[in-house]
Image (spheres, helix red, strand yellow):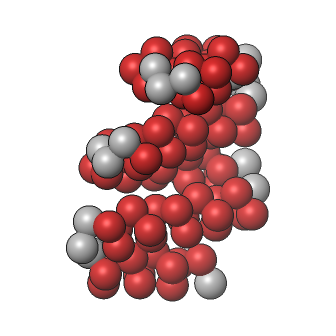
Amino acid sequence: RIAAYVQWADGHLENAIRLYREAATIHAAHGNVAGQATALLRIGRIHHYSGELAASDAVHREAIALYTAIGDTYLAYTTLAELAAIHQLLGDTDGAAQILNDCW
């Protein structure tokens, strides 16, 4: 994951996404659901910061499902909050409000 972060920080977003995808796959193969979810969340953030909001939405939802599956409510809710921000940027204020309501 460090290599992926460095690629992201250096602006090599496609490489960072590829490395985070590889990390997610490795974590999944070893049953590390938290690691898989975190790698996916970072992919979602890269898409978000790149303006690829639909892609970010999809990956955030994957991470939320994984965090929820392992009972990590803190990271599930913080990721939901990020998802709400994405929907707000998409102009979907009703969807953003519903997502935030789901946090409660």
Q: Is residue 29 left or right of residue 100?
A: right
Give how far across and how far down residue 65 sits, in percent: 54, 51
The residue positioned 30% from the left and 84% from the top of the image is 94
- In the depicted structure, whether residue 101 falls above or below residue 47: below
The residue positioned 70% from the left and 57% from the top of the image is 75
Q: Is residue 36 visible?
A: yes
Q: Is residue 17 visible?
A: no
The residue positioned 64% from the left and 64% from the top of the image is 78
- In the depicted structure, whether residue 29 falls above or below residue 54: above
- In the depicted structure, whether residue 50 falls above or below residue 8: below
> Which part of the image, by quadrant, shows the C terminus?
bottom right
Q: Is residue 103 left or right of residue 35?
A: left
Give how far across and how far down residue 19 sits, in percent: 55, 16
Give how far across and how far down residue 36 sits, in percent: 64, 31
Give how far across and how far down residue 83 sits, in percent: 46, 62
> Which part of the image, by quadrant, shows the N terminus?
top right
The residue positioned 31% from the left and 81% from the top of the image is 93
- In the depicted structure, whether residue 75 falls above or below residue 102: above
